[in-house]
Image: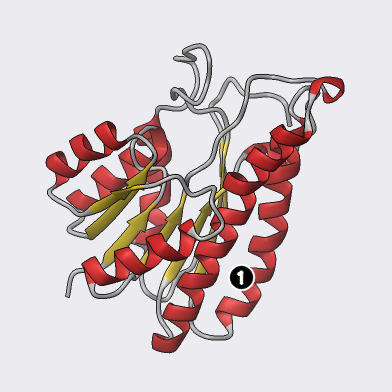
Amino acid sequence: MRRTALITGATRGIGREVARQLHAADFALFVTGRDAELLARLQRELGCPGLALDLSPVDAPARLYAAAREALGRVDVLVNNAGFNKAKEPILQLTAADLDAAYALNVRAPILLAREALRDMAARRAGHIVNVLSSIVHVKQENYAIYTAMKHALHGFTGCLTKEARAVGVKVTAVYPGGVNTTFRPQPRPDYLRPESAARMIVQCLTAPDDVVVHELTFRPMVETNF
């Protein structure tokens, strides 16, 4: 039986490469992203269902999971990859609106999606939830206060999720990539990780032997020395 996967943030960068590599590994996919044109292009490429959606509204995660489950029959894997980061911003310039926007997409959405997945997977005592965080959790950098705070929040949640999911037979993997050369950044960084390399690391966790679970995975480009 083909395994199934719901991938958020699938229209660019790591998420798009995870979708391509899981498709190559014969997963049935449901993909989502905010850019309807890019999503339609990916759906044509992979021949899979999807939904163009902003995950920031409070009801969006539950609607997305329900749509994926209806299209796929069941969800074996959730890859919580969607997120965003503004350009560098010192604390004195941040606003409440910045905080609200970052929280809605980087914290609340993946938490609510994980809740939906855990409820569904626990009933089958099977499944795998992957939360894509950032190696910024392991360091502290000026001008990244909001992004760092949001990733720390998801990091803490993922630790709790790991314990609760383990009790009902569900695997959880927290992924902490270092710098990746994607459009997430204002300027190209060819010395950073290629998106397909980061995706390969994630896919290896999802295709490991059944008796293996990778709880935490950190990887960086060789040029990264901030740790």
- Specify the quadrant of the image occupied by residue 174: bottom right
Q: Secondary structure at mark 1?
A: helix
In the image, residue 195 above or below residue 120: above
Observer able to see residue 31: yes
Residues packed near mark 1 inside 10 Å, few (<14), some (14 to 19) or many (20 plus): some
**Residue that appears at 43% across and 86% down:** 125
Asked whether 109 or 201 is in front, the reply is 109
- Specify the quadrant of the image occupied by residue 14: top left
- Residue 182 in the image: x percent, y percent? 44, 25
Residue lying at the far top in this picture: please name it: 187
**Residue that appears at 70% across and 33% down:** 98
**Residue that appears at 48% across and 68% down:** 213
Answer with left or right where residue 217 lies relative to residue 54.
Answer: right
Asked whether 194 or 187 is in front, the reply is 187
In the image, residue 92 above or below residue 116: above
Pick the quarter of the image with the N terminus: bottom left
In the image, residue 23 above or below residue 75: above
Q: Can you identify the residue that label 1 sits on?
A: 162
Observer able to see residue 216: no
- Residue 148 in the image: x percent, y percent? 73, 38
Q: Count how many numbered circles sit on residues in the image.
A: 1
Pick the quarter of the image with the C terminus: top right
**Residue that appears at 26% across and 71% down:** 70
